[in-house]
Image (cartoon, grey):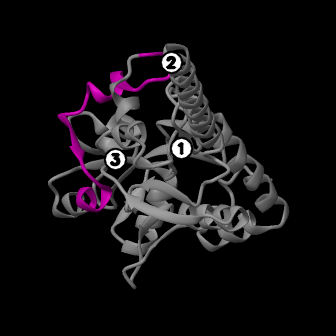
Amino acid sequence: MKKKIALVLIGTMLATFALSACGEKKDTAKNDAKTDDKTTFTVGFDAEYPPYGYMDENGEYTGFDLELAEAVCKLEGWELVKKPINWDAKDMELSSGSIDCIWNGFTMNGREDDYTFSTPYVDNSQVIVVAENSGINTLEDLSGKIVGVQAASSALTLLQSDEEDGQKALADTFASLNEFADYNTAFTELKAGALDALAIDIGVANYQLKSRGEGYKMLEETLSTEQYAIGFKKGNQELCDIVNKDLKKLTEDGTVAKLAEKYEISDMVTLK
């Protein structure tokens, strides 16, 4: 009798072990196939960063980056989820998994070790915008002036950096360097005379100057040159490779060139 009970117990234990192993194998397979099972693609972007990402007159989020992301999603059969984020919270959004990538005029220079980056797709410069009648014509003229910049932006990093390619020495001549959550607010301050100048990406500057009409100018001297790329969580090479492959297809079929022309950044796009 004891022998029979022992055999039953052993059989039960073996069955339980087998079920557990099967379940574990199934879960592992599911985790390994998470990119294959993907149905949505969530892009984190600054909603006030034209022409790359912004809200249009119809209340819809659009822009060069968002339309390019939409084209990638069509190739993959994904649904694009456009998620406006506070730019200074972008790292938290990415690390928490609430977004798949940062795709919105995101400078890769100096951040190469912090993210897994796509192929660079735009050459960008950091420039200075001032009121047309400000009397400011060179970077030296910024001495003693109040300069605005977006919080957590590459322009701010540049002006705080004392490395060889940094501009801290220039920023030290300013009366102050004021941070703003977005450039629309900063332009309002510039128009009101509360700011003397703005440090800003050239693509955004061109868009703002065109949409706002007369009254502003861009200095000929640039602060730096840099490249935009799509930032994925460090180590997420699989998703990055998929997007890189799609960017190549979209370049070859003319989609990238068409969007670049639409948003007037053809001379800046590097995907050829």
- Tell me whether the residue at label 3 lies in contact with that at label 1, contact meaning CB atoms closer than 8 angstroms: no
Residue at image mark 1 = 125
Whole-percent x, y for residue 214 in the image: 37, 72
**What is the tally of numbered marks visible in this picture?**
3
Q: Which of the two labelled residues, at mark 2 and mark 3, occupies the earlier sequence position?
A: 2
Label 2: how many residues lie within 10 Å, few (<14), some (14-19) or many (20+)? few
Q: Viewer-nearest of labels 2 and 3?
A: 2
Q: Which of the two labelled residues, at mark 3 and mark 1, occupies the earlier sequence position?
A: 3
For label 1, the SS is strand
Q: Is residue 150 left or right of residue 113?
A: left
Whole-percent x, y for residue 173 in the image: 26, 27
Q: What is the CA distance from the residue labelled 2 to the residue labelled 1?
A: 85 Å
For label 2, the SS is loop
Determine the residue positioned at 72% across, 71% down. Answer: 258
Tell me the kind of residue under disc 3. Trp
Label 1: how many residues lie within 10 Å, few (<14), some (14-19) or many (20+)? some
Whole-percent x, y for residue 207 in the image: 47, 66
Q: Is residue 55 above or below residue 272?
A: below
For label 3, the SS is helix
- Look at the image and say whether residue 177 sits in the magenta stretch: yes
Q: Is residue 153 above or below residue 198?
A: above
- Look at the image and say whether residue 259 sits in the magenta stretch: no
Residue at image mark 3 = 87
Residue at image mark 2 = 1
**Residue lying at the far bottom of the rendered structure:** 58
Tell me the kind of residue under disc 1. Ser
